[in-house]
């Protein structure tokens, strides 16, 4: 069973439409859609935005549905000038850029008293996603790198530059680092798949609605393509 998490309706609606024999269960006010997608048993959930929502959804997928892997699909802001709107970033790992215990001497984004603050993604899922992405989305770039997550829609050059400098990430979003954290603690393989919807700077407001839909087309093609090969 594969768990699929998207933060917003738009990020999961097209996947939901393709599900066969869907049934729904509500837990912690979240709807978990169970069924078959491209021949695989999946549970699909719209977590809502942000790290807490993403953690709750992940934990239910892990503990209640006993998923064998977690896939997080959605959009992100690019932190790298080479990565354009519509391109895809696959997580090598994920970090929480807003974890800040500098007041006690820890570097920004480091979680105190924990062996790991940068959570590695599953190498098999990464390799599969990369090869499928080149097949199903040949017109766009596919990049592998760090995903930085925080409870912040990054929309200023200052915030963007700081996150990039502190984390070295390729893109910023609001859930992947939390899903990665839950997956790490439970020893469940995970992958974050993000299509770039904006440049995470002052232009975000203008770019976001117009590019989000096109970005999601690419993630939907990739997730369905991966499931068919799993
Ligand atoms: N998701 C899409 N674009 C984003 C941004 N600029 N910051 C945070 N999350 C995002």
Image (cartoon, rainbow, N blue to C red):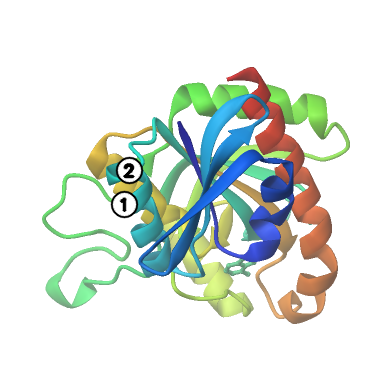
**Crowd class of label 2 (few under 14; some 14 to 19; many from 20; radius 10 Å):** many
Instruction: Tell me the SS state at disc 2.
Output: helix
> x, y percentage for residue 72?
53, 47
Residue nearest the observer in this picture, 143 or 168: 143
Image quadrant where one finds the C terminus: top right
Which residue occupies 13% across, 73% down?
104
Vertically, is 72 above or below 173? above
Which residue occupies 63% across, 54% down?
74
Residue 46: tell me if it is visible. Answer: yes
Distance in Å between CA atoms under marks 2 and 1:
5 Å
Marks 1 and 2: in contact by CB < 8 Å?
A: yes
Q: Under 8 Å from ligand 1: the CB of mark 2?
A: no
Which residue occupies 81% across, 60% down?
213
Residue nearest the observer in this picture, 67 or 32: 32
Q: How many marks?
A: 2
Which quarter is ligand 1 in? bottom right
Instruction: Tell me the SS state at disc 1.
Output: helix
- Tell which residue pokes out farthest to the right in this image: 139
- Name the mark on residue 136: none
Q: Under 8 Å from ligand 1: the CB of mark 1?
A: no
- Name the mark on residue 59: 1
> x, y percentage for residue 103?
18, 78
> x, y percentage for residue 79?
62, 59
**Crowd class of label 1 (few under 14; some 14 to 19; many from 20; radius 10 Å):** some
- Answer with left or right where residue 65 lies relative to residue 17: left
For disc 2, the marked residue is 62
């Amino acid at each position: 069973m594969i768990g699929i998490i998207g933060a917003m309706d738009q990020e999961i609606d097209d996947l939901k439409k393709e599900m066969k024999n869907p049934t729904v269960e509500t837990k912690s006010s979240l709807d978990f859609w169970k069924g078959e997608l491209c021949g695989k048993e999946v549970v699909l959930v719209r977590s809502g935005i942000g790290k807490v929502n993403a953690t709750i959804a992940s934990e239910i997928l892990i503990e209640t549905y006993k998923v064998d892997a977690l896939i997080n699909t959605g959009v992100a802001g690019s932190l790298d000038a080479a990565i354009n709107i519509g391109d895809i970033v696959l997580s090598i790992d994920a970090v929480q850029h807003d974890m800040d215990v500098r007041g006690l001497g820890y570097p920004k984004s480091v979680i105190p008293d924990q062996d790991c603050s940068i959570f590695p993604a599953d190498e098999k899922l990464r390799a599969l996603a990369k090869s499928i992405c080149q097949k199903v989305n040949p017109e766009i770039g596919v990049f592998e790198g760090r995903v930085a997550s925080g409870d912040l829609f990054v929309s200023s050059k200052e915030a963007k530059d700081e996150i990039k400098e502190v984390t070295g990430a390729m893109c910023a979003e609001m859930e992947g680092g939390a899903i990665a954290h839950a997956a790490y603690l439970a020893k469940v393989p995970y992958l974050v798949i993000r299509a770039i919807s904006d440049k995470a700077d002052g232009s975000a407001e203008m770019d976001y609605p117009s590019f989000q839909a096109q970005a999601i087309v690419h993630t939907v093609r990739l997730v369905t393509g991966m499931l068919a090969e799993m």
